Image (spheres, helix red, strand yellow):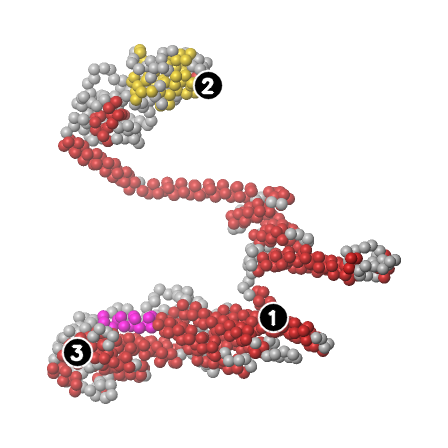
Amino acid sequence: MPRIKTKGAAYGNDGPVSERGPPGTRIKIRGEHFGTKPTDLVGLTVCGIDCLLSAEWKSENKIIAISGPIKGEGEIIVTTRLGGKGTCNVTFKGYHLATVGPMKESAVWVEETPIFSWGRHSLSPSSYQQEDPLGLSVEDNENKVSEEDLLRNFPDKTGDIASTTFSPGWFLLENHQATSFNDLQAGLVHLRRKVQGQKEGQLSFLKANISSVMDQVDTLVNLKERSEKDLASGSSFSSASPCVIDRNIKRGEYDIVINDYIRVKNLFHKTDIPVFKEALNEVEKRIVDLQKKLHEDLQAMPTTVEQQKRLIRYLVNLDSPYDPAWDAIKSRSEYINKKFKLIYNYHKALDKPEASKKGNSATKYSKYNTPMPGEVTIVPACVNFTDEICLTVSEIFPDLWKIGQAYFSGELQVKVEPGRQRDEIALYLPELLRSVRSTYATLIRLDLPNEALDIVSALLLDLRVHCMSILFQQTTEQIKQLTEHWTISFSGKHTGVTELPLQFLQLVEDVIQIVKESALSTEQRESPLLDNQQAQRELEKQLDGMLTAFHNVLNSLASSEDYDDCDDSSPVASQLIGTPVSASKIGNLKTNVPTWEHRLLITLSNTLFTKNTILYSVSVKFKESGFPSVDNPIKNSKIKLDNLERSILDKYLEQKSDPLVGTIEPSMYLGRFDWDQNVRPSGSHPHEPPPIRPYAKEVINNLIHVHAEVNGVSSALLDSVLPKIVETIAEELYRLMSCVQKFSREGAMQARADIRALEAFFESYTSENARRYFEGGLGGGAGAGEGRGGGGGGRAEAVQGADADAAAVLEEDRVGTAGVPVNQCVEADRYVWRVR
């Protein structure tokens, strides 16, 4: 252990000084056992601060150290390689001195060149004198608070602004005890301005050099990506090289082979580098060989279920061309059959007469048959055969069952196609039913007891019900797969609909015919299938499933807007306020898919056709084929289709009527029109109603567009769509007229002419509600305001405020059934005839 003789006395440049000093004080440490070379000194701490980097080993008796940023009192500890730790009994106390600048008078010599630098330093004047952060002078401060008092009042704190334990109170007491409050406020302003200037300087630097900075960042990012890619490529390819794959295959480490192969394939399947392409081809050849080997191991029997599951997982992850899960089931089935044949051939050979004579040993059946004296007990070969067959089934059939259940439950990580098992079975069910019936007829001719025949009869009944159920389920799956091609038929028996409802009807009629010929037919000693309550419930359930499946197909067509690729989605707009009329979508020309509105109309037409025609045909087909009444499923389906019809109609009206109605008010008041103005169109007679205004013509034109669109799909939809839109228009006119505060004589005549003209044009599609709204807009239909918070009363007040002469003229202008003079409708004759 080193021994320090000097008791830790500190020495300055001119000799020994007191046992204290500021940071940078040179400390001469004398003692014994300091080592024989500089590398023997492995540790030196002063007051807990590591000073080894600044220490200089002189000899085995002398070390020179320089104190670090020490504040407080502590020990000097020297650690050597051979002697361990040695501690001085005299402590060293460190403290900080006020910085003396080059322009400040001092009674002692101040070394201008720093003896030792702790950290970074610059060549600026601040390296010689620390500038006060508040910009205040600290040279006149005297009577400072002692360091002991500061440590006692601020434990674990410091006045160094660069320290993480900086305390503002310590700093102010140490440097600005005598500074006035006003000077401190000015210093705070200086500090804030300095910080803000530094921020602005950094931002200005970035702005001035933004292009260079961004180029440097891009370069660094590209270098990083290229290095990572090269690293990943090299490591991935080296870990999956052909020789590595061969080695892992021999070891049976198939998981490692699969992971490396998948990673390399993802990285290099599009590479153009010849070396990588050639190596990847070699890897592919080895993977193909591995697939063959695993497939052979999968089919090798006997093996455990767990081993087969593991091999299936390997083959699936390797994207093998086989169907490993199904091959595993087939291999077990073939193994069982082969085992049965071996057992059969073995016992058949033992059943020969000469073989029977050789048997003279006792068996497990001896206790049931006590032999006579002198006789030899011989067990028949058929008994041993049956015994071994049962034992074999008990041993190996459970594994076949387990692997089969794992396959259909999806546990084997293979994709079981929906309805695969059902579809495969459904193809053979009618033939299977005929085979069972043939066997049943043979048994009947044998005059077997009724108890035995009843067992087969029950089996046959269950098979008939199951056959009917599976066939209907298969049809339900086919209905779910129906697709719409959006081609409307305008010729033949059914017009205005697509092939979709007819395809549905064809599927239903086909399955009815198959069920009628197989499960529904009765033969000897069979009762009618549908006399059974379970069979009736199953029939209604399956029929309801088929009808619901087709309803869901129609609903999905009315709920999907996946085909819309057009930017312009305004169904109806206004030329008066700056948007083109008929700005509807043009559909997807590449796929021949019509617009969203047309698809709604086509689906609506198919829905009505299904409800009114298809369901009736389905009901008639069931009745003609000998099935009982299916009124309940048909009724439930009609209710669902009614709801679907309303839903589709609401969506179409939302697309059409809302934008159409929304343009009426801005078009009506275009050009700052006022119903109280006294301006008449040029050329009109003072006592004749004026021509209808442009907004009314635009409403008619927009409705003609809707009429043409609906009629282009099916004229049967006109009575369902147009009355709703006309009613919405009438309601909007009623609202606008109710909001008018005052009419002039000319304004009242104009309003009456507009409303009467629209009422006449829309007469063929005007409902009772629309008619009440039209009358309410004229001020005479108070009933139109029902449910609208007294809107009719507001209109009545507006009419009462109109000019008396205008009201008289309005009453005299009732001409014709529509209430509009014929000579004033000339401008809109083309609209009238096109609408009608």
Please give left or right for residue 563 compared with residue 700 in the image.
right
**Secondary structure that dominates the magenta span:** helix
User: Which numbered dot is residue 81?
Assistant: 2
Give the x, y percent position of residue 668. Answer: 21, 73
Residue at mark 2 to residue at mark 3: CA–CA distance: 112 Å
Question: What's drawn in magenta, residue-wise?
Answer: 653-666
Q: Quadrant of residue 573?
A: bottom left
- Amino acid identity at mark 3: Ala
Q: Residue at x 45, y 68 (%)?
A: 591
Task: Tell which of 594 and 525 is nearer to you.
Answer: 525
Number of disc labels: 3
Residue 658 lies in the magenta-colored region: yes
Q: Residue at x 32, y 17 (%)?
A: 92
Q: Residue at x 68, y 73 (%)?
A: 452
The answer to whether one can see residue 384 in this image is yes
Give the x, y percent position of residue 581. Answer: 30, 72
Mark earlier in primary sequence (1, 2): 2
Instruction: Tell me the SS state at disc 2.
Output: loop
Please give left or right for residue 320 compared with residue 710 in the image.
right
Quadrant in the picture for the N terminus: top left
User: Which numbered dot is residue 427?
Assistant: 1
Mark earlier in primary sequence (2, 3): 2
Task: Tell which of 775 and 488 is nearer to you.
Answer: 775
Mark earlier in primary sequence (1, 3): 1
